[in-house]
Amino acid sequence: MSEEQFTNISMVVCLTGLIVFMGFIVWDLGKKSGAGKFGTFVLFLVLGFGVFGFVFKEVLVNFLMHK
């Protein structure tokens, strides 16, 4: 396994773990703050936009590099 392959695999694994952990933090924050269902939904929606932006950037960069 080359260093590049290891880096790519570890980035995917670590970022997935970080995103899952951030989801747990947002869920816990919504529960402890008494945000209710709608407030928790809004918190997850905002987190989802951040994750979507990161994934979209990666897809766009890969698309433009292979063009």
Image (cartoon, rainbow, N blue to C red):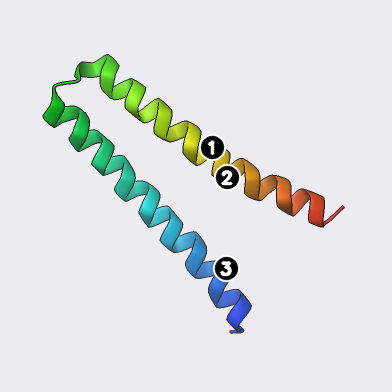
Q: Where is residue 24 in the image (x, y as percent from the top left)?
A: 26, 42
Q: Which residue in the protein does label 3 denote?
A: 8
Neighbour tally class for label 3: few under 14, some 14-19, many 20 plus, Cα within 10 Å: few
Q: Which residue is drawn at 57% across and 68% down?
A: 8
In the rendered structure, which disc, 1 or 3, sits on the residue that comes first in sequence? 3
For residue 55, the mark is 2
Q: In this view, does 35 lie above or below 12?
A: above
User: In the image, what residue type sits under mark 3?
Assistant: Asn
Q: Which residue is drawn at 64% across and 45% down?
A: 57
Element assignment for label 2: helix
Q: In this view, does 17 lie above or below 9?
A: above
Quarter of the image for residue 25 reads top left
Q: How far apart are marks 1 and 3 (CA)?
A: 19 Å
Q: Position of residue 4 (x, y in %)?
A: 62, 77
Quarter of the image for residue 30 reads top left
Drawn side of residue 23 relative to residue 55, left or right: left
Neighbour tally class for label 1: few under 14, some 14-19, many 20 plus, Cα within 10 Å: few
Q: Residue at x 20, y 34 (%)?
A: 29
In the rendered structure, which disc, 3 or 2, sits on the residue that comes first in sequence? 3
Q: In this view, does 60 lie above or below 48?
A: below
For residue 52, the mark is 1
Q: In this view, does 66 lie above or below 23?
A: below
User: In the image, what residue type sits under mark 1?
Assistant: Phe
Q: Position of residue 48 (x, y in %)?
A: 45, 33
Disc 2 to disc 1: CB gap under 8 Å: yes
Element assignment for label 1: helix
User: In the image, what residue type sits under mark 2?
Assistant: Val
